[in-house]
Structures are given as C-alpha cells and as structure tokens.
Image: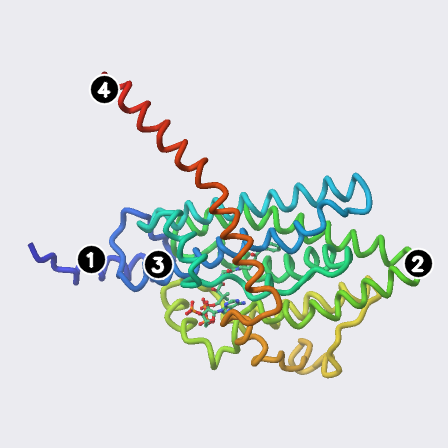
Amino acid sequence: MQVDEAPLEKAFDATIGAGDRIEPRDWMPEKYRQTLIRQVAQHAHSEIIGMQPEGNWITRAPSLRRKAVLLAKVQDEAGHGLYLYSATETLGVSRDELTRRLIEGKQKYSSIFNYPTLTYADVGSIGWLVDGAAICNQVPLCRTSYGPYGRAMIRICKEESFHQRQGYELLMTMMRGTDEQRAMVQESVNRFWWPALMMFGPPDGDSPNTAQSMEWGIKRHTNDELRQRFVDMSVPQAEALGVTFPDPELQWNEERGSYDFGEPDWDEFWQVVKGNGPCNTQRIAHRKAAYDDGAWVREAALAFAAKARADEND
Ligand code: FAQ
C-alpha cells in the first residue's frame, strides 16, 4: 500500500520549525535519517579512534597520578563512542554494521586523530585544543533536532569540559617546570594548532552538507562560525599559559570584535580526510585488529543469548 507522505512531511517540518525534537518513532525524510547516520556514526568513530593517540602514552605516563587521569579520560572516550553508537542504532543501523563501514573505509572519523602523539605534552595539547574544539562544536549539538543525539551530547559535553581542564592543567604544570618542558609544550602546540582548526570541517563555501543540515536543525552553526568562536576562546588561554600559536596573521580585529587568523592548509586537510594522513593506515589497522581479536567475545555472547532463549522456551 502506498503511503501518502505529504502530511507526514508537513508534520516533520512543523516539528523542526517549532524547534522541537524528532524522536526515533517519528516519521522522517530518508535523507534526514541518512545525514544523521553519517554524522553521528562519524562522531562515534572519532571517539573510538580518538582513544589511540592518547592511549599511546598510558604505559609511559610520568607519574601514577597522570596515569590514572589519562586512563580515566581514555575510558570516557570509549563511553562517548558507545552512547553515540546507541544513538545511531535508533536510526535503524547496527553498531556491528557501523564498525564494518569504518574498517572498510566507507565512513570517516575526525581528521585530527591521524596525527601522531610524539611527546607527553601532546596529551595536554589534545585535552586543551582537541577537546576544546570538540566542546565548541558539540555544545550547540545539545540542541540538535534529533532527540537521542542531543541527549547523548549533554553528558558528553560535561565530560569533555573536564577533559579540557585536565589538558590545560597538565600544560600549566609543564610551563611552571624547566626550559626544556616549556619548549616541549610550545613545540606540541605548534603541531596541534592547525589540525585543531581543521576539526571544524572545510570552509563554508566548500561544505556541501552545512546548508541542508542547518535547515533541518542538525547543525546549529556553520563550520566557519564555530572555528572563529574557537580561535577567540583559545587566544586568551594561550596568553595565560605563556605559549603562542604558529600563525603570523593572528591578530585582534577591533571592528569585528574577533581575532583575524590565517588560512589552514586545506590541501593537507583533504589528504588526511582521504586517508593519506600521517597515521590513517596505523589507526584503521589497530581498530581492525581489536575488532578481529574480539570476535570470540561476540560469538560467545551470541551463543549464550541463544542458549538462554532456548532454556526459556523449554
Ligand atoms: N575530519 O559538508 P561538511 C571527538 C568531511 S571530537 C574528517 O562540512 P558536515 C572528541 C565530512 O564528513 C571529533 N572528515 O560536513 C575527542 C564530509 O564528508 P562526507 C568528532 C571531515 O558533516 C576529543 C566532508 O568532509 N566530532 O572525537 C571533517 O556538515 C579528544 C564535507 O564536510 C564530530 O564528529 C573532519 N574534521 O560537517 C575524542 C562532531 N570535517 O561525510 C578523543 C559532529 C568534515 O559527506 C580525544 N560532527 N569532514 O563524505 C559535525 O559537527 C560535522 O560532521 C562536522 C563536518 C563539522 C565535523
């Protein structure tokens, strides 16, 4: 039987227009559903792959306190990935399928996690700049139009704020240390600044998804608006810390009430997004190995569930 979708679409548009939320059982246009699957899955993959760069330092943390803090942070990221996979599952696609799409390179994850972590200062820079950029992007997503995504974002943002502070505190401690430690912080910030700006996505003129996603209330701000907000937020923090950003064009613009800044290297960005960044191959190989190693756990869980069902029917 052919369903007349016109009244359903009208109700959907009215819900979006009123700033209310779409819930899993509501009718939604197929393209809205696909856009959400793309964005929320990419976000979930980013959290899971994002465990690797910092995880690299867990066994080499400089003290027991730093090790405990880092372990807790990386575990939080696993949790964020799971909330987001659960939110994506409400759109009718399983976590197993999403993991397969990631491993086969059919879905993306954030470009930032394809850069290496070369020193312990990188743990601080990731907390300060990468979690900082993530918060800037994600706080507006707490008001996104799809209910399960917005609700997942609320808890994630609280934890990311804590992550950002721990990164800043780590760097502040190093800045109070030796000249060598201060140089280590500056060198790390130099490497992470531009990739952090790229996290917000391509410039608005080259962003094919922004206009429609904003119309649907999935995104609340454009990529460039959020990038500007992040720059304005970060410059005073860098001054308080005693580091500089590697951008000669960075300066306060009195008229705009914002900082002017240089153009990120967008060729580098697209190379990383296409899989040619410094660590893309390593990140996916590691994720695939973890997935393959876990096959026996999934099989055992399914066998256990089947047996429990059979016992119930006896
Ligand atoms: N990396 O048309 P747009 C974290 C792709 S935070 C890779 O502008 P859209 C926390 C984009 O998918 C990081 N690909 O796309 C943490 C599209 O390709 P497609 C995750 C990118 O969706 C901290 C194409 O370029 N956060 O994990 C990137 O409207 C520390 C055209 O772009 C989120 O995912 C990129 N940076 O806007 C964890 C936030 N940018 O799919 C561990 C939610 C763009 O059409 C440690 N996502 N692309 O083939 C969003 O807000 C949006 O998806 C954007 C992109 C803003 C990322």
Residue at (16% x, 60% y) in the render: 5
Rendered view: 79 above or below 136: above
| Mark 4 or 2, nearer chain start | 2
| Mark 4 or 1, nearer chain start | 1
> Where on the picture, by quarter, is residue 250?
bottom right
Image quadrant containing the N terminus: bottom left
Which is more toward the observer, 101 or 139?
Answer: 101
* Amino acid type for the residue under numbered disc 4: Asn
- Label 1 crowding class (10 Å Cα cut-off): few <14, some 14-19, many 20+? some
Q: Please name the residue that numbered disc 3 is placed on.
A: 18
| Mark 1 or 2, nearer chain start | 1
- Label 4 crowding class (10 Å Cα cut-off): few <14, some 14-19, many 20+? few
Question: Where residue 183 sits: x, y (%)?
Answer: 86, 66
| Mark 4 or 3, nearer chain start | 3
What SS does tag 4 mark? helix
Left or right, residue 112 beside residue 22: right
* Amino acid type for the residue under numbered disc 1: Leu
| Mark 1 or 3, nearer chain start | 1
Give the numbered dot on residue 142: none
Q: Please name the residue that numbered disc 1 is placed on.
A: 8
Q: Please name the residue that numbered disc 2 is placed on.
A: 178
